[in-house]
Amino acid sequence: MTTATEPKSEKIQTIISDVSNLTVLELSELVKALETKFGVSAAAPVAVAASAPVAAGGAPEQKTEFEVILSGSGDKKIQVIKVIRELTGLGLKEAKDLVDGAPKTIKASVTKEEAENIKVKVEAAGGKVDLK
């Protein structure tokens, strides 16, 4: 006997069972294939559907700590050194060594918001930043 929320069709129940066993990557691939096949976009429903298997499957949580890495100083090296000094509290020599030795970690174990703020400041000065 089926409940009010359970589909009566065995085909539908089988599909739901199969989809619930997919990984997030496989689910993403399925959604793209369905969008292509039927010429539609399922952006909002996908977010809801994708979050359910992740929570149920015990997948790792979203990353909360980031490492900000200076990957290059660009052509405005002095400006980048000034920003690095401001962000880290390093002395002139240490900040210059960090910029000269790129790629180097500017800050580690920072929040996503702080990492994004650092990235914006360094890139505004002409540097290149990667977040990991």
Image: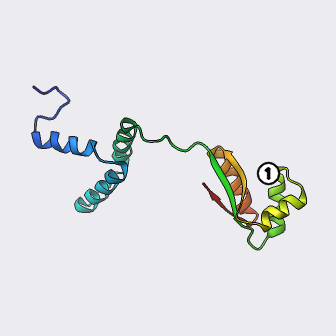
- Please tell me which residue lies in front, 26 or 36: 26
What sort of colour scheme is used for the picture?
A: rainbow
Quarter of the image for the N terminus: give it: top left
The residue that disc 1 covers is: 87
- Residue drawn at (67%, 45%), measured in percent from left and top? 109
Relative to 131, residue 7 above or below: above
| Residue furthest out toward the bottom | 75
Q: Amino acid at mark 1?
A: Leu
Q: Residue at the location (16% across, 26% down)?
A: 3
Q: How many marks?
A: 1
Q: Is residue 16 left or right of residue 115?
A: left
Element under label 1? Answer: helix
List x then y, in percent, for residue 54: 39, 41
Quarter-of-image position of residue 121? bottom right
Q: Quadrant of the C terminus?
A: bottom right
Q: Residues within 10 Å of mark 1 (few under 14, many from 20)?
A: some
Residue 119 lies in quadrant = bottom right
Q: Is residue 105 left or right of residue 96?
A: left
Q: Nearer the viewer, residue 1 or 34?
A: 1
Q: Is residue 67 left or right of residue 18?
A: right
Q: Position of residue 14 (x, y in %)?
A: 16, 42
Across and down, in percent, residue 87 comes to 79, 51
Asked if residue 69 is positioned above or below residue 113 in the image, the reply reads: below
The structure residue drawn at horizontal position 22% and vertical position 45%, both measured from the top left corner, is 18
The residue furthest right is 92
Please provide percent x and percent y for residue 68. Answer: 67, 54
68 and 44: which one is in front? Answer: 68
Residue located at (79% from left, 61% from top): 98
